[in-house]
Image (cartoon, grey):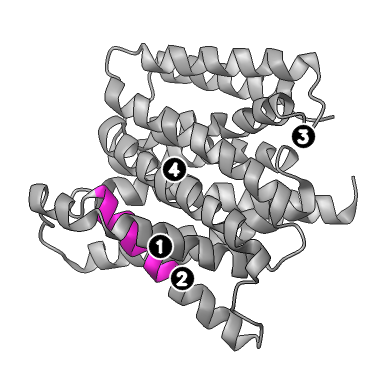
């Protein structure tokens, strides 16, 4: 394993750990701000932060024309649809389950890589995918599980897996902060048109200091920092291999959900977690 790949995996591990904590923060903030509005604000904050960072470093913040199409796809599929589905699913099903189900995302990338003949995927990868999907089924069958929440979390996992494939094929030679900045802006603008309708049905609650801090954390840390780390990980380690770093996400999300939000980690959760981990380990590249 080369130094570049090792650095990529480390960046992916840091991003996944940040996202594990994100589920706990988003669970709290979603009690005040509805999901689509929250994601749109989060994307806007992230775009401003990353452009300021690029300007501070003296880097060009303008997006090359050849990246318009792939970055637009990343913004719409991954940054808008996937994150909104994550927030809706987390609000319905809880932080622990949210962080766990979306760990199946790298396995979606494995499947798509094979189906589209982008990479040769061995039989063991398909076996791992099947075991992981069994883990999702066990989780969704829990008596205390919100099935609508599970549905949205599966949508989030599928679209995030697609995002990994798009990112892995198009952005390896470009500045991760630049790619993340413009994907964030595109995702935020796409969602902004839906915000008025959502607020008419679900008005914003009472905003306090903790809410503001949570929004800033989601925008600056969970998006600007973590997404830049993730794009770097994909560039250095590849879309499939960098997915191994997602193993940290359910550990952090589950433990923080249990410790800070009082969420239960019952037998079905533990069994589903084991199946997901085993499936991901079997499917990982050698």
Label 4: which secondary element? helix
- Badge 2, how many Cα within 10 Å: few under 14, some, many 20+? many
Give the foreground label among 1 and 3. 3
Q: Which mark is residue 82?
A: 4
| Circles 2 and 1: CB atoms closer than 8 Å | yes
Report the side of 8 relative to 56 (left or right): right
Query: Is 12 included in the stretch rendered in magenta?
Result: no
Label 1: which secondary element? helix
Q: Which mark is residue 58?
A: none
Q: Which mark is residue 47?
A: 2
Write the start and end of the magenta stretch as one range. Answer: 35-46
User: Which sits earlier in the primary sequence, circle 1 or circle 4?
Assistant: 1
Residue 13's spot in the image, x, y percent? 64, 48
Label 3: which secondary element? loop
Query: Is 43 included in the stretch rendered in magenta?
Result: yes
Please determine whether, in this image, residue 1 is positioned above or below residue 233.
above
Q: CA distance from mark 2 to mark 3?
A: 31 Å
Q: CA distance from mark 1 to mark 3?
A: 30 Å
Residue 10 in view of the camera: no
Residue 191's spot in the image, x, y percent? 32, 55
- Badge 3, how many Cα within 10 Å: few under 14, some, many 20+? few
Q: Which residue is mark 3?
A: 118
Q: Nearer the viewer, residue 18 or 79?
A: 79
Residue shown at 36%/62% (left/top)? 189
Q: Which residue is mark 1?
A: 43
User: Which sits earlier in the primary sequence, circle 1 or circle 3?
Assistant: 1
Farthest-out residue, right: 2
Q: CA distance from mark 4 to mark 2?
A: 17 Å
Residue 22's spot in the image, x, y percent? 42, 50
Please determine whether, in this image, residue 235 is positioned above or below residue 212.
above
């Amino acid at each position: 394993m080369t130094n570049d790949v090792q650095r990529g995996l480390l960046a992916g591990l840091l991003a996944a750990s940040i996202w594990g904590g994100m589920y706990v923060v988003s669970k709290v903030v979603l009690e005040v701000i509805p999901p689509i509005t929250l994601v749109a604000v989060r994307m806007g904050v992230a775009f401003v932060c990353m452009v300021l960072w690029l300007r501070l470093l003296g880097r060009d913040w303008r997006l090359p024309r050849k990246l318009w199409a792939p970055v637009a796809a990343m913004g719409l599929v991954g940054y808008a649809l996937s994150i909104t589905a994550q927030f809706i699913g987390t609000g319905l099903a809880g932080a622990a389950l949210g962080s766990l189900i979306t760990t199946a995302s790298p396995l979606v990338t494995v499947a798509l890589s094979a189906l589209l003949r982008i990479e040769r995927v061995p039989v063991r990868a398909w076996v791992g995918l099947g075991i992981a999907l069994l883990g999702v089924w066990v989780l969704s069958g829990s008596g205390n599980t919100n099935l609508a929440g599970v549905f949205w979390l599966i949508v989030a996992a599928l679209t995030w897996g697609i995002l990994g494939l798009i990112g892995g094929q198009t952005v390896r030679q470009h500045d991760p902060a630049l790619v993340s900045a413009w994907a964030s802006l595109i995702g935020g603008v796409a969602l902004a048109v839906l915000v008025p309708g959502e607020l008419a049905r679900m008005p914003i609650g009472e905003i306090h200091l903790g809410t503001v801090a949570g929004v800033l954390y989601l925008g600056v840390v969970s998006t600007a920092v973590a997404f830049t780390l993730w794009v770097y990980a994909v560039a250095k380690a590849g879309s499939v291999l960098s997915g191994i770093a997602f193993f940290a996400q359910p550990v952090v999300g589950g433990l923080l959900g249990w410790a800070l939000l009082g969420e239960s980690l019952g037998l079905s959760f533990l069994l589903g977690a084991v199946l997901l981990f085993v499936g991901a380990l079997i499917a990982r590249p050698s």
